[in-house]
Amino acid sequence: MDTRKQQDAVAPRRPTLRRRSHQAPPPLTLGAEPLEGWQLLEELAQPWAGLLWNCLRSVTLWAGTAREKRAGLFSTEGVAALRAELPALGLPAVLAEPVAGMLHCLQDPTACTDEAVAQACAEVAGWAEREALPATAAAFAQAAALADPASAARANAAGRVFREQHELVRAESWFRVAVVRGRHSADWESYGRAYIGLANVYMRRGRLPVARRAHLRAYRAAHRHGLRRVEAMALHGLFVTAAESSNPRSAERYAAGALRAYGPGHPSLPALAHDVAYHWMQRGEFARALPVFLALRPHLSGTAQRLSLESSIARAAGVLGQADEYRAALQRCRELLRLPDTGDQVAGALLDLALGAIGLGQWRRAELLAQRALRQARRSGEAQVQLAAEAALASIPAQRAEAANRTVRAPVTGSGEPGPEGLALRFVRALAPRPAPA
């Protein structure tokens, strides 16, 4: 027998590769609550809260029951009368129609469609989000995703709500369900958004390589199917992971790609511009960051966002020796700090103001601001800001002595951008006010 044939005869045959089945484990539908929807009752504290709770549990039971077994699932006694009495219960007007739809499901479980029940639940979830009722929003967003088991968009919505409530395990489970549903239904937009949702969960856990892979999957799917918005979101996320991973060259490339994909006037462009400018500032590239920060002023309205922006402007301007710009930003920060809705930006803003004062050689102001930043960081438990404030305070005596021995202020290094079409200039142009149509 030929030697090669002998070897083939005794060699183990390679197993036939089967196409991988894209399945997700069932989503996690319960957290730490003792009873399904219990937090809804505590959160609403209204006479009609029990009605919503019963609707929630009924929809969940209906969704988990096979279609052919839904007939006679609920007792219909009194449901018609309850539907007629809805206006007298004090229920908010915006909830009347979706609650009536869920009660109709109780009356005739076989007549309701998945889409109709899911839409009723989604309307309640949307109302709860607008009213800052997170437990109610999460419960009904999940009910909507359960009621329409083919919808990737509903699963994404549930994942997003749980992520915003920092329930990362439940958020991850729903995003994985959305990935599978999106693939099965060829809903590539929801598929890409689900991977972006997963990447954001991984980012919060500090798992940067896994987050990067999820963003890459979203980008490739969006690019393949011409989904420009999802592509831009994925590139934005890839920029953040590259910046967090100290990979400035990749971060720059992804930032430029996200800018092209968003384009001027896109509502997410200011968030990207702020992320990129802040990244430059953290790297000491203040001359690139400052023009972008200044161009962002007309685009931010919330108190916390404006405080973060103005303190960044003050820091960059101070390091660059622009005393007038620092003084104007400092005054804006003082006004914003008197407002109640500053969020978790106070300690970081005070630290940026202190660093700007150090850049200008305003030593007493720098000490006072850094001390305030340190106290605020300790109260709010912001460990990174606390360490940075302590380092700033410790550095002031040495910098003050060094400045006293200098006759000329040392130039800021590593802050220029070559070429007239640099990325900072492109951001400034994209953020410029657009002329009104004639």
Image (spheres, rainbow, N blue to C red):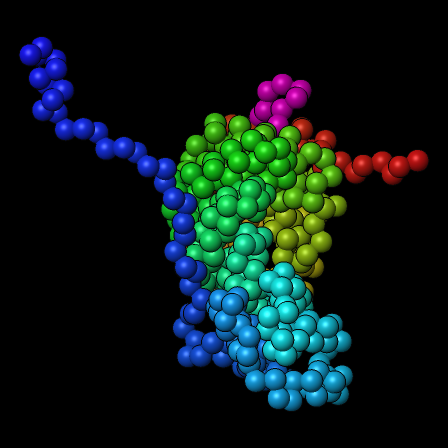
Between residue 367 and residue 375, name the one nearer to us.
375
The residue segment tinted magenta is: 416-423
Visible residue check, residue 368: no
Side of 137 where 11 appears, left or right: left
Who's the residue at 45% across and 41% down the image? 214
Between residue 92 and residue 261, name the one nearer to us.
92
Q: How many marks?
A: 0
Which residue is the extreme one toward the top? 2
Between residue 389 and residue 276, name the one nearer to us.
276
Position of 156 relative to 114 (above/below): above
Pinpoint residue 87: horizontal percent, then vertical percent. Answer: 76, 83
The chief SS type of the magenta part is: loop
Quadrant of the rendered image containing residue 231: top right
Position of 28 relative to 300 (above/below): below
Q: Quadrant of the N terminus?
A: top left
Position of 407 relative to 42 (above/below): above
Who's the residue at 65% across and 89% down the image? 78
Residue 419 highlighted magenta (yes or no): yes
Position of 337 relative to 81 (above/below): above
Visible residue check, residue 119: yes
Between residue 120 and residue 210, name the one nearer to us.
120
Pinpoint residue 276: horizontal percent, then vertical percent. Answer: 57, 38
Who's the residue at 43% across and 32% down the image? 247
Q: Quadrant of the C terminus?
A: top right
Who's the residue at 47% across and 76% down the image? 36
Pinpoint residue 370: horizontal percent, then vertical percent. Answer: 50, 54
